[in-house]
Amino acid sequence: MISDSDAETEQQVRPGIAERLSRMIRLPTVSAELDRRGTAPFDDFLELLAELYPRTHATLDLERHGDFGLLYRWRGREHTDPLVLMAHFDVVPVDESEPWEYPPFDGVIADGSVHGRGALDDKGALIAVIEAVENLLAAHVTPARDVYLAFGGNEETFGDAAALTARALHDRGITPWLVVDEGGAVVEAPLPFTRGQVAMVGVGEKGILTLRLEAQGSGGHASAPPPTTAVRRIARAVARLGPGTFRPHTPRAISRMLSLLATQTTGASRLLYRTLAALPPLSATVFSLMGGEAAALVRTTIAATTQTGGTALNVLPSHASATVNIRIALGEKVAGTIARVQRRMRDPLVFITVVEEDDPSPESAVDNAQFALISAAVAASYPEAATVPYVMMQASDARHYHRFSPAVYRFAPLTMTTSQRASIHGVNESVTIDALKRGERFYRALIGGLA
């Protein structure tokens, strides 16, 4: 444990976290627009980090992995079983046709919040990490074990920064004791009938599989079409890949989530959640019928995202295609998922090409010292919040670590309302200044709680 008292460390917390995040947001580090913007915003971001966090850059060792991977090493009293804190500094593009309350790359500070692209995803979490390190260094703290800060600049484009960084650690024989990346957040009443604040900690994430479906057909004039055109064949295949393509089942993490959320309810609602927790087949059925996010918790999802075919209004295309994006449930595999898609389409003339693939992660434990440390850090930063496990539906850079680290969790210690969660990759993204301060406190407590 770190000997410095909380009161002593608290005095070292610098003011101005909102202003520093504002400066980060002003740099449009849009990884999907490198052709348009170039790498200048990314280079400027690295210079800004060095300017804003001089103690961190004077004390920690910094390595570059690829063009966009940063790995800081803070040497602790012990060098085995380190803590790895992850975040990414790239952001998604802005749809300029959608109006923002404040310009997305101005970093406006107003109404107790910092506004702009990346405020939540993921510069808000990144700044909370590095602020905590800078403040602990100012308090002359040395962590009990090594702490690594793994920041990536191409997470939004499924780039190689995190993969290269993880591989470097693995090749050196370094097995992280705990990895924490973005994922869940601190939310109010995450499911119907629940109440109070809940820190949703992702203990696993679904796999990702993108398939291109292609079909050939006879071209010609549209006035005399054959019974089955290339477009019709693809449309029929997509229609057969509906919500019921994959059977629902409830992962252990969701049963644990329901059991803990039962304590956040009363009366009949408490009995309902306890029953759902105790009967996974029942919860799988109920959640799948609810649709949306609830259904995505208990089944592999599939969604058609693009379709192409044809060059003129009156000409039959000889080729048509569609892309489907699949999020694979825990316990399933890429190979089995592809086989099921083929069976459901029932058309050997629709050909499948794998665009990207990654199996789902295993579930990290909730009865270990690592999850207990996360829970303690939540209690230090959000005393009213219960810490609850869940399954993350999106893909994160953390997937590169679960192959060799036994405890990988996905949690950004920031409060997020329903509208704020919708603003991620949407419009009017913002984070409250209070959430930034609490996020910094979370990481300080996490590092300080290392044994």
Image (cartoon, rainbow, N blue to C red):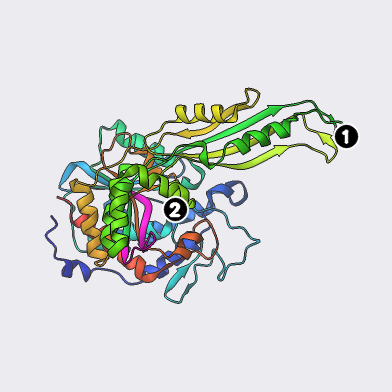
First of labels 1, 2 by sequence position: 2
- Of residue 209 and residue 263, the one placed in the foreground of this image is 263
Residue 95 % position (x, y): 61, 58
Q: From the viewer's perspective, tell me whether residue 59 is left or right of residue 431.
A: left
Q: Is residue 195 magenta?
A: yes
Q: From the viewer's perspective, tell me whether residue 418 is left or right of residue 389.
A: right
Above or below 311: residue 426 = below
Residue located farthest toward the front when viewing the structure as drawn = 268
Residue located farthest toward the top when viewing the structure as drawn = 348
Element assignment for label 1:
loop
Residue occupying the point 49% across, 47% down: 156
- Of residue 257 and residue 274, the one placed in the foreground of this image is 274
Residue 348 % position (x, y): 62, 22
Residue occupying the point 23% across, 42% down: 177
The quadrant of the image that shows the N terminus is bottom left
Residue occupying the point 55% across, 62% down: 427
- The magenta-colored residue range is 181-198
Instruction: Inspect the image, locate mark 1, and give the three-letter code of the amino acid beneath it.
Output: Ser
The residue indicated by pointer 2 is 89
Q: From the viewer's perspective, tell me whether residue 34 is left or right of residue 264.
A: right
Above or below 287: residue 54 = below
Residues under numbered marks 1 and 2 in contact, where contact means CB atoms less than 8 Å apart:
no
Above or below 311: residue 150 = below
Determine which of the numbered discs, if any, sits on residue 223 in the image: 1
Q: Is residue 265 magenta?
A: no
Q: Is residue 113 visible?
A: yes
